[in-house]
Each structure stands twice: as structure tokens, then as C-alpha cells.
Image (cartoon, rainbow, N blue to C red):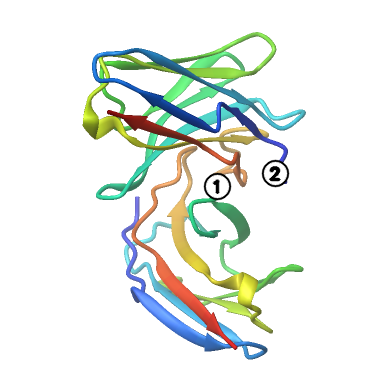
Amino acid sequence: DAKTTQPPSMDCAEGRAANLPCNHSTISGNEYVYWYRQIHSQGPQYIIHGLKNNETNEMASLIITEDRKSSTLILPHATLRDTAVYYCIPGSQGNLIFGKGTKLSVKP
Amino acid sequence: DSGVTQTPKHLITATGQRVTLRCSPRSGDLSVYWYQQSLDQGLQFLIQYYNGEERAKGNILERFSAQQFPDLHSELNLSSLELGDSALYFCASSLQPTSGGALYEQYFGPGTRLTVT
């Protein structure tokens, strides 16, 4: 499985876009990039995933670079309830390998 | 609400004891995963079942075991408990484990907080 590098923490003002980067330079061709988040000791929550193309759903957008070595999760209008630890997880097998993630703090 | 249920929510027990954690997956999901989250180790994959069969093993101790029943619910058994087993235990479910290189998104339950004293 590919290793990831994420900033340990980020701040974002409420209402602004939150852009969370992830480096996964060792990702293999069949590995998708998954993003999950965990809000204070709750069960992790699936956000979005992608392989090559950019993806968007009701929660977020995912931008994957052409060489697939990095990606950015975008929360377009962050709210206080988006404060959480965000995990970027490349994978193609059944189990998720969680790293340390990025602790996003959304401030009023 | 993810649709995954876990019982009990909290469990306090003594060292050396044995406990069973229970998980009911989302309706229609055939695959169940167990994860452990402790303060020093973060979220770690323990074991996966698909339609009653063990599919993958992670960092699961020999003192721990799991099974998935015909009705697809799963139980995680922890025995000879040690202080270091105190953690949050999450169960997740997905439709299938993998398909053509893509793993289906997993839906996590609220967790069981185990405290070993």
C-alpha cells in the first residue's frame, strides 16, 4: 500500500473553502484515493474517492494530479461541524490503512 | 447514522477477563471489518469477514478472535485482557470487499469503548 503525507493540522475560517493536501507519491496504478474523516471519537465517515479524474459529491470535491502522486480534498464552504481529522487513504484491498491524518479546525 | 450498529457502547472490565463486542452491518452489506483505535496507535485494521468467511487479517493479537454469523452480524472476542487493550473498537461494513481494484466505501459504526482496569 502507498504511504501518504498529510500536514498534521490546518485551520480554516468558517464559510471559506478548506483545501486539504495529501501526497501519495508511491501510489500504484490500481489504487484509488479515498478520503475519510473522523469527528472526535465518532466512527470514521466516508467522504469521497477517485482514481484519475476529479470527483465531486455533496460533501466535497477531490482533485487528483495528472501523475496521481498527490490529491487535494476541497470542502467548499467549511462549517464548524467540519472540524475533524481527515484521512487520505490510497488502497485497492479490503482494509483501510489509516495514517495520522490532518486535524482541520474550522474557526468562527 | 451510518446504519451500522455496535453494542455495547461502553464496557469496563478487569485485566484477565474476556469480552465480546457485537456488530450489525448495514442492510445488504456482506463484508464486515474490525478496527482498533488507541491513543498511541491510531486506527488499526484488525480483521475482515466477507459473507461468513475470514478475508483478511491485520494486526490482530492471538488473544483476539472474530466471526461472522449467517445473519451477517459479527462478534469480536477479546480474551486475557490487558491494560493496553483499552481502546475504541470500530466495526465497519461494505457491500463487497473489492471489485476491479476499487474497494467499496466502508461505513463505520459508533464504536465500543473498552476500558480495562
On screen, residue B95 above or below A35: above
Residue drawn at (69%, 12%) of the image: B71
Q: Tell me the quarter of the picture where residue A74 sits.
A: bottom right
Q: Residues under labels 2 and 1: Cα distance? A: 9 Å
Which chain is indicated by disc 1?
A: A
Residue drawn at (51%, 67%) of the image: A84
Residue drawn at (76%, 68%) of the image: A58
Give the secondary structure at mark 1.
loop
Give the secondary structure at mark 2.
loop
**Which residue has dot 2 on it?**
B2
Q: Residue A76 or A80: which is nearer the viewer?
A: A80
Residue drawn at (22%, 25%) of the image: B82
**Which residue has dot 1 on it?**
A43
Q: Amino acid at mark 1?
A: Gly
Q: Residue A39 or A97: which is nearer the viewer?
A: A39
Q: Looking at the figure, which quarter contains the C terminus of chain A?
A: bottom right
On screen, residue B18 above or below A3: above
Residue B110: x and y, percent? 58, 41
On screen, residue B80 above or below A1: above
Residue B43: x and y, percent? 38, 46
Task: State if disc 1 and disc 2 touch (CB < 8 Å).
Answer: yes
Which chain is indicated by disc 2?
A: B
Residue A3: x and y, percent? 31, 59
Residue B4: x and y, percent? 66, 35
Q: Tell me the quarter of the picture where residue B113 sits.
A: top left
Q: On the same chain: label 2 and label 1?
A: no
Left or right of A15 on screen, residue B45: left
Q: Amino acid at mark 2?
A: Ser
Report whether residue A54 is seen. Answer: no
Q: Residue B13 or B38: which is nearer the viewer?
A: B13
